[in-house]
Image: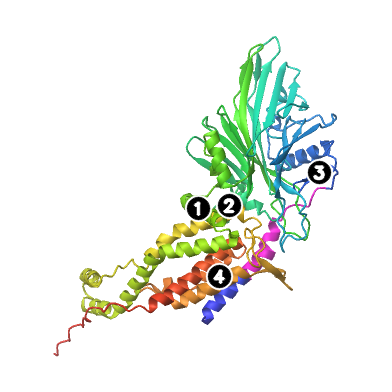
Amino acid sequence: MDRKSIVVIVSCIIALILWQFVIVPKYLPPKPLPPSNNVITNGAVQGTLTNGSDVHQQLQQAVQMAGAMPNPSLQLEINTNIQEQLVVVTNENARYTFTSYGGGLKLVELLNYPETVPSWRNKKARTEGVATLNTYTPSPTLAVLGGPAVQGDGVFNLMRTTAGVRAEKTLSNGLTIVKDFSPTTNFLMNATVWLENRSTQPLSLPQQEWTVGTATPMNPNDNGSYYIGMMWSDEKTHDTIGSSYFSSRGFACMPKVPPAEYRVTQTNITWAAVHNQYFALAVDPHDNPAGVVMRKIDLPRLGDDDVKPASSNGYTAALVYPAVTLATNQIVQRQFVVYAGPKEYHLLSKVAAELNNNLDSVMDFGFFGFFSKGLLLAMNFLHAAVKVPYGWAIVLLTVILRVLFWPLTAAGTRSMKRMQALQPQVKAIQEKYKDDPMKAQKKQMELWKENKVNPMGGCLPALVQMPVFWGFFRMIRSAIELRGAHFLWASDLSTPDTLFMIPGINFPFNLLPLLMVGVMVWQAHLTPPSPGMDPAQQKMMRYMPAVFLVFLYNYSSGMALYMFVSTLLGIIQTKMTKTQPVVAATPVLTPPAKKKK
């Protein structure tokens, strides 16, 4: 490695350290709220949960301070003098907690998914809890917001039913709201809501917001600011809204005034969901609403001072229904299916087929979703068929991909070798026709054609494999299967493989990204530059490993494992291809001798 390469890589490491200790602290979340016996913390229900008035008041204060809901009618106003009533329903998948405050689903605890995955980085975090959804929500799922005409004092009467839970309330204006919740299989729940006018006069109801839920980072290592937000879908496409929409930094980091809310007004919305990296809570209405809205709220800090904090922001979403007038004794019925569970593609595909929608899009694989889905299915197949852990499944999948691309890569390498062998002829042509660039280019193309050289042959393998790289990148980020998956010293392939913190600077030492960069530098020295490549491009390619180091150092170790194995196999292929003879080139064209005067 030359001196410039060393300087660039050292500079990147220094930049990583400065980012960790100068930039990141500026965006740390606020200090945690004072402890309370009723607070739901880190996804585990603490205390007796018999009276949630303190929790509700704290959440409302946080929402008001954040200015997330400028319209008071869109907040869940509760008469906290009335004690909160809770009903818990449990099945083989989850424990559902329903609240009388708003008459909806307050908390979902996923019994088969731990809150945190034990590793070196989060060994001090609590691990006895389970993964949760709707934690710290200011209003429960399917709470109806829209002012006193649809809320009253906000307190419902809860009762157990054969299938689940019923919430019922009669307002002073004669409106009766009845909600039935029935948990089923595959993390699904059926919900039916009746709005009935029991008064003797027509009853005008304002526009309402029916709460979907609140997206929150599940634990301090959830990287919530990158993964939490809302998704919604119409009959054909889907859209994802996250923290960047509410950012105060605009184009080129210029400051901007963040919007108070995100709102879509269209009548073909098929579902809306709030989510973090690996779990989602989605509501699928049978009758399409008139829109969807999302707002940012401030959250208490999760975790302790010894653990990297999660995002301090949460995002609450709601379906919007238009104003309606109910005649005397008229009943409006609305039906919903609620999914509250993991973002596991096989399960979501089954649920989407059952509901006849595209709920599996909540995986959000992005532009290269076709490749991400294929790679995820292939990885799961290898894990199940070969009976190997997911780390080795990634290794096997990388080997298979390299074998599939072997002919293309070998052809590209041979093409580059032929082009290098033809460089003397190319220079001779350029010298002979230096006054006629068009003819020089024509002769050069004829030379390449005669020697069966494709000038794009060296770049084509990289271009073809680029969608696979990005597909792998998005798949690794979304695959819940890798959460807690081990590989050698890496205890969780969904997080960096930190071995220890470097003394003095308290910076994580992640081994796999360093091994990845090492083999990439080795490969760069083995691979000759393409003939005719601009010197600036050659330098950029030489320093590309440093870019990957910055980009992937704190990313999931599963991605670094894939890059390490893929690059190592590329080195083996390069060495094997170098041993193959190159087809002899056509005779060298010499420029004509200058005439003597």
**Real-space Cα separation, disc 4 to disc 1, in angstroms:** 21 Å
User: Which residue is situated farthest in the bottom direction here?
Assistant: 596
Secondary structure at numbered mark 1: helix
Secondary structure at numbered mark 3: loop
Q: Which image quadrant for residue 388?
A: bottom right
**Real-space Cα separation, disc 2 to disc 3, in angstroms:** 30 Å
Whole-percent x, y for residue 102 in the image: 74, 30
Asked if the residues shown at circle 3 and circle 1 are in contact, with their CB atoms under 8 angstroms apart, the answer is: no
Please give the label number shown on residue 478: 2
Q: Is residue 556 magenta?
A: no
Callout 3 amino acid? Val
- Residue in front for this viewpoint, 488 or 433: 488
Segment tinted magenta in the rendering? 14-33
Say above or below: 137 vs 221. Answer: above
Callout 1 amino acid? Ser
Q: Residue beneath label 1, please?
A: 372
Please give the label number shown on residue 39: 3
Callout 4 amino acid? Met
Q: Residue at x 75, y 51 (%)?
A: 301
Asked if the residues shown at circle 2 and circle 4 are in contact, with their CB atoms under 8 angstroms apart, the answer is: no
**Real-space Cα separation, disc 2 to disc 4, in angstroms:** 21 Å
The quadrant of the picture occupied by the C terminus is bottom left
Asked if the residues shown at circle 1 and circle 2 are in contact, with their CB atoms under 8 angstroms apart, the answer is: yes
Whole-percent x, y for residue 433 in the image: 21, 75
Circle 3 crowding by C-alpha within 10 Å: few under 14, some 14–19, many from 20: many
Q: Is residue 541 left or right of residue 86?
A: left
Q: Nearer the viewer, mark 2 or mark 3?
A: 2
Q: Residue beneath label 4, please?
A: 516
**Real-space Cα separation, disc 1 to disc 2, in angstroms:** 9 Å
Q: Residue at x 45, y 77 (%)?
A: 526
Mark closest to the chain's N terminus, 2 or 4: 2
Asked if the residues shown at circle 4 and circle 1 are in contact, with their CB atoms under 8 angstroms apart, the answer is: no
